[in-house]
Amino acid sequence: MERSTLSAAVSGDHFAPRKAAALLAAVITATALCVADTAARSYPFGPNTRSVNDLGNQYVPFHAHLWDLLHGRADGGFLVNWRSGYGSSFLPDFGTYLSSPFALLVGVFPRDGIDLAVYVVTVLKTACAAAAMAWLLLSLRRGRWWGAGLLGASYALCGWSVAVGSYNPMWLDGLIALPLLCLAGEWTRQGRRPLLGVLVVALVWIANFYTAYMATLAAGLVLLLRLWLARATRRQRLVAAGRAAVTVLLGVGLAAPLLTVVYLGTKHAYPGRLVRFRPVPTEDLLARLLPTTYSFSSPAVYAGTAALVLALALPFHRRVPRRVRTGWTLLTVAVALSLQWGPTQLVWHAFATPQGSAYREAFVLCALLVIAAWHALSYGPPDPRALGAASVLLVLITAVASRSALVHPVTWAVFVLAVAGALGGLAILRYTDGGRGADGRLRADGGRRVVMAGLALALLFGGQFGEAMATSAVATRLRLGHMDDYAPWGARQEAQAKVIARADGWPRYRTDPGREQTVGNDPLTVGGQGAQYYSSLTSDVLSRTLTALGGGWNSRGRSLQSLDNAATDAIFSVGARVHSPPDPHQNWFDQDGSGPTVTRQDVPPLVTLRPSGAPAAGWGPSPYRNQELLLGARVYTVPRITVRTSKGLPPSPDPRHPGLLVGVPDPGTTRQPTVTATCPAGSEVYLWAPHFWGTAQLADGGPTGRFRSDVRVTKIAAMQRLGTVPASGRVHIDLTPNGTGTVPDGAVGCLDTARLHTAVARLKATGATRVTVSGDSVSAQLPQGSKGVAVVAAPRIAGWRCAAGDADARPAGEYHGLIAVPVDGSATTVTCTFHPPGLRLGTAVGAASLLTLALLSGLAAVRRRRRAAPPPTTTTRPREPVTGAL
């Protein structure tokens, strides 16, 4: 032990070294992240946004909605989110994105500082992961507190953290969970803190079940290795493993009320794509061990050069017991190999292939590298033989990695400096360790050795800080260039929020934030109640319903867009609609410089009455006819169309989708592809072309319809309004493709607004006279004698139960994807209440786990009391924990 550690021990503060190490690791981590973002000129230290991909589309908006919930400004509660998807189940989203205790911190920030709040939470989570790992290392084995702090920061600043976790903040809870679960494993091994161990498991599973599952697997492997290394009997090992299993079961059981809701939410979600795992080449895997390498589709297993050198030196470190170095080396290698094999990849991801990055468990390997490095350092710095062997392995790794395209000149510059700092620091540290005698006192040349020790620490900490900062900065810059990005809260969102607040009339009618979206979850960000909704739990019924009505989506059907259509606005009671210029941050189209405006429309109430025995036919191929099916009236003319290419020729059919292929005109051609048709004069023209990418406009002028799709069908375009049919009745649409796309048969629909107004008037006359909406229910007052089917303009997601009058509540019926309740004329009220599927089951499991935990705690207390007061004629020998020289 060092002098500070001895002093702390004398003073009675057994945890002082761990506290110092945890604080050091947290400070290094937070500082490195902020300096890296400053170097990358990233928000909040520069003009570059950090809201890339799902961070801008999902996570920041969901945190904004949490802010509204905490401040009583949300439409809905923790069960139903009335802002998104015309009414969605919120508890599964909460359990997926917002259940971390850190998420509550957004409530102390101003609403327009939501991006800053998420950034602070991200930095704080990463710093806490560093502190937790530093604490764990000193719990596994005593050693230099500053070494534990250094390696704790290496873990928190690993490649997975800065390249993946930084824009998936809910996954960072898994980065914290792994060392905490390993600590809980130590307690079960020693028979200590059983209640705290269960609470730790419950907390991390509630915070983020997805990465907690991976962390639990990793902690289980660590515990098994620790039990194998322990000097204990087979029975003692089995008892400790049994205690650990009970701890996990009870902890997961306590988290069950949330876990079951999320699990069943995924079962009702729109299905994602089936992805086949393909391991990355060996050179790419090894390249990701080096600093400043970046790739979305390869495992980010960089854990710091010093940690890597120590881990490579462990098998050759003669001060470390053979059993210890063999065990940790084999475990680390086995986990590394598991990343490259399909079956074990499925195990790491709970038997569900990830639809994004395939290596979400890479932080586990980073943790094992750091723990292996700690065992190499805690027994004393490696000798020249071990460092030499590690250097040879490092050269081999570098030689193979140099063949990877992920390695670039900056990598070599940073890596050379990091290697010099790591090897130089460890070599000098080994020399300074010889400056003390057997009694721990400095020898004659101890003063010089103290100076050298300071140099060693400067090299180690300087190298680690510099390469971690560079790796984070490079990842931030490259991520911005490879992914979609979105502007933080600014003037655009401020203007939208003000306009929506003035127009809002919920629940008399909905206010849609508009077709011109800023992010995939605009309603959560700026308010209103729209179709827009992006979540991993977007319901299947909502996605299919809106697609059948002509809606568009991204992310393979899980990011639904607003549909600017008068008929669907009537169906879903959208009485106010915001129109904004396209987001200038996207730089997709020219800007007109105008601000948001609002158009209003007379719409039926949220609950309407339809006749009994309505046709139960499913969706047809035409979205115009599908809209009429829901509306209950014929309002469209769907004419035959003529499509011509830029050469004036009939296009060929598309082999992938029903329709005709149109492509980009040849260079120098002034003509564009066209669509022509004949419709009643004065009707509104709509174009439906889900697999077209480009713009469309009537030859006589009118609004420009913008369509965006792709050949991989990760996104389809929504139906667009193009203007009014001229007096001639001739509809001529000019297309400007950005790529090859498809115009389907029946692409043009002409809406008769007079017929629509008549249909709306009929629905208003027979619909609800008053509608009340809460966080989990909808109640409507109907006219006397109402007969037929009361239809709530909300998707019939699983969990709705309804009753007419005083009748018993039953699972809600379905009217073409919407909530339906039969009424026979005797009832004048309809009430629907939402219960998330799985909540009752999860609550029962949680209650049983809590009761079991209370009984076990009571029995343990009784046993402790009996041991504390043994019979006077007997001598009680305390039970020895499963420990040993590890």
Image (cartoon, rainbow, N blue to C red):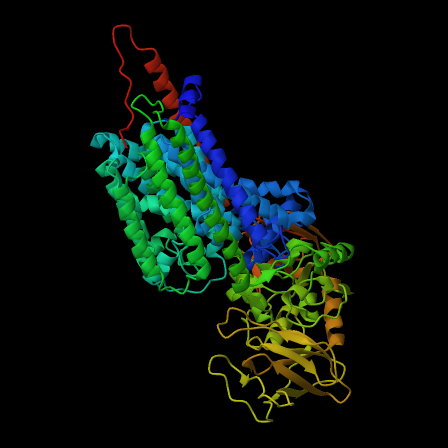
Query: Up-down: is 800 above or below 2?
Result: below
**Quarter of the figure with the N terminus:** top left
**With 613 as the anchor, is 853 left or right in this view?**
left
- Total number of numbered labels? 0
Query: Up-down: is 682 above or below 24?
Result: below
Q: Residue furthest top?
A: 872
The answer to which quarter of the image holds residue 234 is: top left
Q: Nearer the viewer, residue 824 or 76?
A: 76
The answer to which quarter of the image holds residue 636 is: bottom right
Q: Nearer the viewer, residue 58 or 383?
A: 383
Query: Up-down: is 672 above or below 546?
Result: below
Provide residue 154's location: percent of width, then percent of height: 43, 44
Provide residue 738's location: percent of width, then percent of height: 58, 79
Q: Residue at x 31, y 55 (%)?
A: 395
Provide residue 172's location: percent of width, then percent of height: 48, 46
The answer to which quarter of the image holds residue 782 is: bottom right
Query: Up-down: is 290 above or below 331?
Result: below
Is residue 232 among the parts visible in the rendering?
A: yes
Is residue 98 among the parts visible in the rendering?
A: no
Q: Residue at x 34, y 29 (%)?
A: 435
**With 197 as the anchor, is 114 left or right in this view?**
right
**Quarter of the figure with the C terminus:** top left
Provide residue 807's location: percent of width, then percent of height: 60, 49
